[in-house]
Amino acid sequence: MTSTTSTATSGVRDRILGAAMELFYVDGINVTGVDLVASRAQVSKRTLYKYFPSKVNLVEQYLARLVQIALEPWEAEAEGPRDRLMALFTVPERGTGRMRGCPFHNAAVEAASAMPEIADFVHEQKHAFAQAIIGLCRDLGVADPDVLGLRIALLYEGAAALSTSLDSVEPWRQARSTVELLLEAADPAGDGSPR
């Protein structure tokens, strides 16, 4: 395969995945059929199935891409574990539509009976997410990184869910200020040194 062919193939695949990401997140997985994804990506249904052999595979690739996107604040130029944790609690800007919350939760709920593989994927990602937060707390040198990490993960998940239910960014503001308090309590000197 030539470089040009490889680039074109990647472009078509990315276009399909981009259309699926937008539609699955905004409209939902169950109501979004592959016909609509193909139409939005401006490809035939046959072309879509060439790159994604099933809707389940397309949903899995959508979620896998979201994992990569979710890691970006952690891989950004943060000055350390505290900044990386706080990057998770950046208050989102209010868009024009309803807040849709965590796409992983949405996928788990929507796919619960129809696509059990998706629920398993979400479970693994949520566990890995909590473990990554615990790892950042460990890097901070706090006395009990497991407890602090799970509390921060809970605040993140709660903010995502409540912001959806209330259609408001306020839960993110509250969660952010609570995480700041937790981190200050874990570092009473306020100088970044472990207690």
Image (cartoon, rainbow, N blue to C red):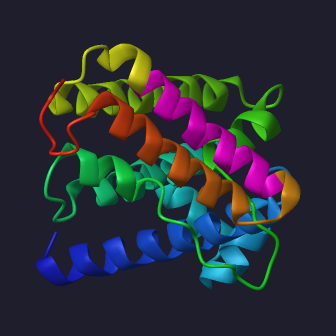
Residue 40 location, quadrant: bottom right
**Total label count?**
0
Q: Position of residue 66 (x, y in %)?
A: 47, 54
Q: Quadrant of the C terminus?
A: top left
Q: Position of residue 88 (x, y in %)?
A: 43, 53
Q: Quadrant of residue 135?
A: top left
Residue sitting at the far front: 189
Queried whether the magenta region covers residue 153, the answer comes back as yes
Q: Position of residue 165 (x, y in %)?
A: 86, 52
Residue sitting nearer the eye, 67 or 136: 136
Q: Chief secondary structure of the magenta span? A: helix
Residues shaded magenta:
149-164
Q: Residue at x 21, y 56 (%)?
A: 75
Q: Is residue 122 above or below residue 100?
A: above
Q: Residue at x 26, y 54 (%)?
A: 83
| Quarter containing the N terminus | bottom left
| Residue 183 visible within the image | yes
Q: Is residue 31 visible?
A: no
Looking at the image, which residue is at 72% across and 80% down? 39
**Does the stretch in magenta take in 135?**
no
Which image quarter: residue 132? top left
Q: Residue at x 58, y 38 (%)?
A: 155
Q: Is residue 129 left or right of residue 54?
A: left
Q: Position of residue 140 (x, y in %)?
A: 19, 33
